[in-house]
Image (cartoon, helix red, strand yellow):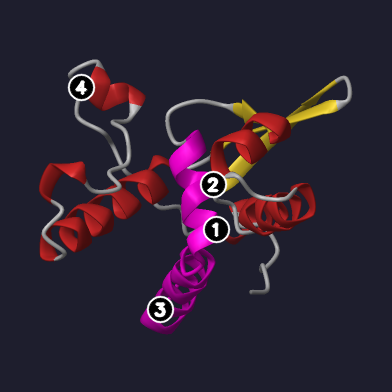
Amino acid sequence: MVGMHEVFDAAARYFSVLGEPARLKILHAICGEEMSVNSIIAATGMAQANASRHLGLMYQAGMLSRRREGTQVFYKVADQMFVELCRTVSTQISSRMGLGDSGPAFPLSVEQAAGQPAVVSVSSSPSKQKEKASV
């Protein structure tokens, strides 16, 4: 049985991955669609090595999924919970900074854009967790 200590440890790992502005830029870029590494680099303005390092950490943390097509690697958000969490926090911070609706909002999820409520689920199954990402 999973105790609260394990839940808090898992939550801290999620927040540590999200605690880097570059990773939030990546999440913002791909939260609405799957993108190739080259497209992510273009959207974020990051150097290739830096973007690849952050993408690898986000993948290891279970935040992103990836697939290879020929020589290209494509990433997408593996769990919509991350987008919802970032959207909520960004909206609050933008509001506090007086940016209102012009702040760094995360786009609507596919479900929300279609008028369906977004369903957020958290798996506590150890078999579904990736190895710990170091930050």
* Any part of residue 47 in sight: yes
Residue 8's label in the rendered image is: 3
Label 3 element class:
helix
* Any part of residue 1 in sight: no
Label 2 element class:
helix
> Are discs 1 and 2 less than 8 Å apart at CB?
yes
Q: Which marked residue is nearer to the observer: mark 4 or mark 3? A: 4
Cα distance in 3D space between marks 2 and 3: 25 Å
Depicted 17 relative to depicted 4: above or below: above
Residue 22's label in the rendered image is: 1
Which tag, 3 or 1, sits closer to the chain's start? 3
Query: In which quarter of the view is residue 129 placed?
Result: bottom right
Query: In which quarter of the view is residue 42 placed?
Result: top right
Which tag, 4 or 3, sits closer to the chain's start? 3
Region rendered in magenta: 1-30
Q: How many C-alpha atoms fall within 10 Å of the one at disc 4: few (<14), some, or many (≥20)?
A: few
Residue 116's label in the rendered image is: 4
